[in-house]
């Protein structure tokens, strides 16, 4: 269960987001993702992969979670990709990439 302080802080941040520009909003959302989702995990930002003739794919953030710390657990770990979109125009942009499902 989320405590009241967390909800209050998030409500304030959402109010601030409405008055920010696109660049500042993206920075805030990225910082929130790092703090709330990626903290304490293995992660990287601006990850580029799938080099080749079909073009490359760039992901804003990628997280890796091993099942456990054994060799087998690391080999069976899960990668999760995150794209930060600060507005609907970012989502609809021609630069938006369709990423293959895992």
Image (cartoon, rainbow, N blue to C red):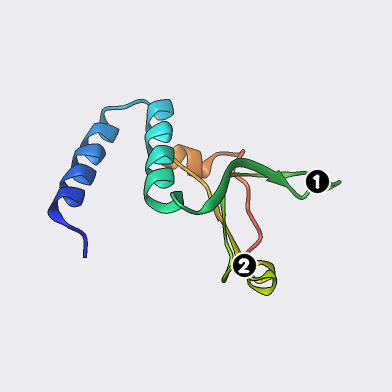
Q: Residue furthest front?
A: 70
Please identify the quadrant where the C terminus is shown: bottom right
Q: Please provide percent x and percent y for residue 50.
A: 77, 50
Residue placed most toward the observer, 32 or 59: 32
Report the residue marked by disc 2.
77
Residue placed most toward the observer, 36 or 42: 42
Mark 2, secondary structure of its residue: loop
Mark 1, secondary structure of its residue: loop
| Image quarter of residue 48 | top right
User: Looking at the picture, does residue 66 appear above or below residue 60?
Assistant: below
- Horizontal side of residue 66 vs 22, given as left or right: right
Q: Residue at x 73, y 47 (%)?
A: 49
Please identify the quadrant where the N terminus is shown: bottom left
Q: Are marks 1 and 2 in contact (CB under 8 Å)?
A: no
Q: Please provide percent x and percent y for residue 7.
A: 18, 51
**Badge 2: residue crowd in 10 Å (few <14, some 14–19, many ≥20):** some
Q: Residue furthest bottom?
A: 72
Q: Please provide percent x and percent y for residue 46.
A: 61, 39
**Badge 1: residue crowd in 10 Å (few <14, some 14–19, many ≥20):** few
Q: Residue furthest right?
A: 53
Number of the front mark, 1 or 2: 2
In the image, which disc is placed on residue 51?
1
Kindly tell me whether residue 17 is visible in this rendering.
yes
Q: Residue at x 52, y 47 (%)?
A: 83
Q: Residue at x 46, y 52 (%)?
A: 40
């Amino acid at each position: 269960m989320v405590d009241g302080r967390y909800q209050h802080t998030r409500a304030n941040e959402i109010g601030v987001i409405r008055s920010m520009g696109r660049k500042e909003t993206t920075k805030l959302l990225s910082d929130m993702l790092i703090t709330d989702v990626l903290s304490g995990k293995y992660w990287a930002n601006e990850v580029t992969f799938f080099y080749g003739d079909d073009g490359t794919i760039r992901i804003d953030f990628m997280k890796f979670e091993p099942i456990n710390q054994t060799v087998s657990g690391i080999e069976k770990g899960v990668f999760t990709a995150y794209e930060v979109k600060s507005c609907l125009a970012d989502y609809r942009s021609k630069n938006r990439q369709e990423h293959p499902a895992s």
